[in-house]
Image (cartoon, coloured by chain):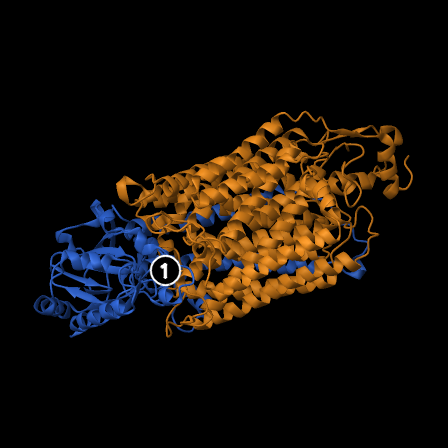
Chain colours: A orange, B blue
Amino acid sequence: MSLDEFFVTGDPLILASQIAIGLTMIGLIALVTYLKRWKWLWSEWFTTVDHKKIGIMYILAGVLMFFRGGVDGLMMKAQTSRPNLEFLDAQHYDEIFTTHGVIMILFMAMPMLIGIMNVVIPLQIGARDVAFPKLNALSFWLFFVAAMLFNVSFVIGGSPDAGWTSYFPLAGKEFTPGVGNNYYAIALQIAGIGTLATGINFIVTIVKMRAPGMTWMKMPMFTWTSLVTSIIIVAAFPIFTVALAYMTLDRLFGTHFFTVAAGGDPMLWLNLFWLWGHPEVYIVVLPAFGMFSEVIATFARKNLYGYKSMVFSVVGIAFLSMLVWVHHFYTMGNSASVNTVFSLTTMMIAIPTGVKIFNWLFTLRKGRIEFSNAMLWSLAFIPCFTIGGVTGVMLAMAAADYQYHNTMFLVAHFHYVLIPGVVFAVFAGLYYWWPKMFGFKLSEKIGKWHFWLFVIGFNLTFMPMFFVGLDGMSRRMYTYSEGLGWEGWLGFSAVGSIVMAAGFAALCYNIYWSFRYAPRDIGNDPWNARTLEWATATPAPHYNFAKIPEVTRLDPYWDMKKKGETGLKKSDLKPVHMPSNSWTPIFLGVAFGVVGFFLVFEWFTLAIISSIGIIIGLVANSFDYDEGYHIPVEELEEEERAWRGDLK
Amino acid sequence: MLKFKKGMYYLLLLSMPLFLAGCESKLVVFDPQGPIARSLTDLILFSIIFMAIIVLVVFLLFGVIVWKYRARPDNKDYEPPEEKGSHVLEIIWFVIPVLIVIALMIPTAITIYEVEDIPEGYEDQDPLVVHVTSADWKWIFSYPEQDIETVNYLNIPANRAIQFKMTSAGTMQSFWIPSLGGQKYTMANMQTNLFLVADKPGSYMGRNTSFNGKGYAHMEFEVLAQSPSDFDEWVEEVKNTADPLEEEKYAEILKPGVIGRMTFNNTHLDWIDHAHGGSDQYIDSELYRITHGDEEHEETDGHEDSENKEDTNEVETEEEADVHGDSGHDQ
């Protein structure tokens, strides 16, 4: 392989990003060196096992990926804004919609949600960390390395170009012989291992580590949805692991699982992919539902309406999510009976989802609704998501789907589900839990700009797509001819995407502004909240709780405040056992990344040699007998006094 | 069943102005040109009524609640009550969606079965069989009874059921003529079946909706529905003027690329039916290799030919194609 094949050359857009990436890297390294922060970075962040710091790193990576995926989206909108434009060529466009999809789902939505889960869940259940802190760090580093590996594809070797669904036979060596789709198979496999570990970690954490008294039906809603999400992860991700392994074998070693030749079965890929892919939608949407529940209850100043039916709905949705995958390919020529059954199971999902919508509405009823930024996002979610939901029911009706399938109508639908369902939730969660992470609020005023620009831009961008889809435009078309009547809709949509991007810019500015100027004296409970994460200092101390709280009912912190039981007795303080930092997670992550990179290019000798790194990491980890350390009572006392004033 | 459909129609008529007021010209899905497309459109409109009602109810409730219970300076001391929930209300909003799902499921199931067959009223005549073979990035239509073949355009007689027997020579495509009916995938090594009918003569757009690489956006074809006599005349003309398709020529056509219209006086089914395997002999992955940033190469719109990278190759094919296409449309 010659050097000009190795690096992607010749495209001015890509050349510019190559230079930009190079300069940014040099700039970052120079900055950290100048500030003499390498040691701090290593010991405070890279080797940390603290769930809060890991969560923050997840969120940071998620915001970065949001930017990358968003730029992809803007480029797609620019290219289709007029007929016959030549801003991007077909190949470039194909790569961009592929990376847009993969990045937004797997490297933006997932880390954002897992990041917030990481920060909040242990605090919300009154625990000091997750069950397996070191595994948690490994999950993060595997995800991060996979995201970097996937992103490097557009400057080295070429990006995947078979869509985020990577349908075979197209994604096979027969039709895409380059390394692009190797990146897909390898990077997603590495990220998938991390996610699976996260799933296991959170199931054990929530099942085993809840504060005394927090029975199943006293768990906060976000904890419930995170638990159910983790269960779906453990149920669904292994399917994807197997599918990706087959894909890797097909592409790297010439097997015939999914090929046209030699009796391969491309339809098997579609089935396996969606057996994971549909539950994946609920993996990202359910935690979002949980966040909305917390935010809505807090700012309506009411407890969540119909808590029990909310719990049953979440469990019901999770159960049904495994039974609907065929609705992604009604048009494959299944028998009428198969399509009928899957239409029914798919439509049934609307029932528990409808229950949730009405419970949220009735939580708001008789409340005293404060329009804080977190609340605005949660409120905007309800109408926007309803549109996504009803169009989902329309798509669920197999016969009607024959006319929507693979069209822009479908694209509009899933953006109406995923943007209100996930992105709005992430924004709500960020505004709500930001103080918990950093000790200051994001500016409400700049936040309003962020909110209105983004929500209006979102509707402008995706509403026209419903209509252009019903007018016969299929998805993933890099260009179209004049006179089809599409350019009006698509031009409108392109303008909308710029407004949405301005909203995102407002968020970035908000973070910068608030970091510099926002007041720091906000107390431990800035929102007058209801759940345990607010019962400790804000930002949370590294040991979370000096004394593990006891729970007697739902919304325990609300109850404690009512009864005036938020204080801490000095006699209750005991030394706190904490896990030590570890270098093995980041080492293993990087080792996986190196092996993955060599596998992408099918340099097997180098891959085998470098896999020694993985073995070293695993062995070192197995012989690590570090039992952690104890925080002495004096230190706890000092830290607690700092925000509580005197102890009782 | 018929009664049910009649009821549906009345409901439809009543609510049509509600949701179609916004769309001035007819979107293709709402402008069916055949019985199959019409039953799909009816189902879609029927579902839109329910969806419109749901959206209306939720939006109204949402608007009223958010407005009425917003925090105001004068209700500062208002302490919202603790509400556990209400069994009656929760059962209501559980049962209503269940009823809606049932109401939508019945016509859905009926339509799913309906569109798998020759539509009512067209059974008296045997359907015209057309074999569809999709390739990168073109459509090949074979008429076994007439023993003719076309590329990238499809002529059919109006008012007669057409039975499409569909397969692919490589990647997966989806065959869709929205004016006439719903879509279905075409896949190598297997055959899918689709019935469509055009009510009256006319020209409709057909396209691939399943992404399959660089030339995907150009995988469109024209469907020309003709009166039966015009159709017969066209077949006659093709038989008299078009050249036969040879195996080498066919292999050339299957190479990845975007080409124009072509017409032949026999079908490739004489030597291969991709539904039954054998496609791999035509697949050459080297032809799919991409060279990043090779501007000239990109210009050819996905037509990649390792032996002959010059644009002339494509132009030739296109000219050739036009000739055949013209003869095909001489009516």
For the C terminus of chain B, the quadrant is bottom left
Up-down relation of residue A451 to residue A586 (above or below): below
Q: Is residue A388 visible?
A: yes
Amino acid on which the number 1 mark rests in the picture: Lys
Residue extending furthest left? B240
Residue A336 left/right relative to A275: left
Q: How many marks?
A: 1
Looking at the image, which is closer to me, A415 or A480? A480
Residue A206 left/right relative to A90: right
Looking at the image, which is closer to me, A354 or A226? A226
Write down the residue under mark 1: B214
Residue B208 left/right relative to A228: left
Looking at the image, which is closer to me, B73 or B188? B188
Up-down relation of residue A578 to residue A151 (above or below): above
Q: Position of residue A154 (x, y in %)?
A: 49, 55
Up-down relation of residue A228 to residue A575 (above or below): below
Dot 1 falls on a residue whose secondary structure is loop
Q: Is residue A188 visible?
A: no
Looking at the image, which is closer to me, A124 or A16? A16
Q: Examine the image and state in which quarter residue A469 appears.
A: bottom left
Q: Position of residue A93 (x, y in %)?
A: 44, 61
Q: Position of residue A346 (x, y in %)?
A: 44, 46
Mark 1: few, some, or many residues within 10 Å (few <14, many ≥20)?
many
Q: Examine the image and state in which quarter residue B46 appears.
A: bottom left
Q: Position of residue B74 (x, y in %)?
A: 80, 60
Mark 1 belongs to which subunit? B
Residue extending furthest front? A2
Q: Residue at x 85, y 30 (%)?
A: A633
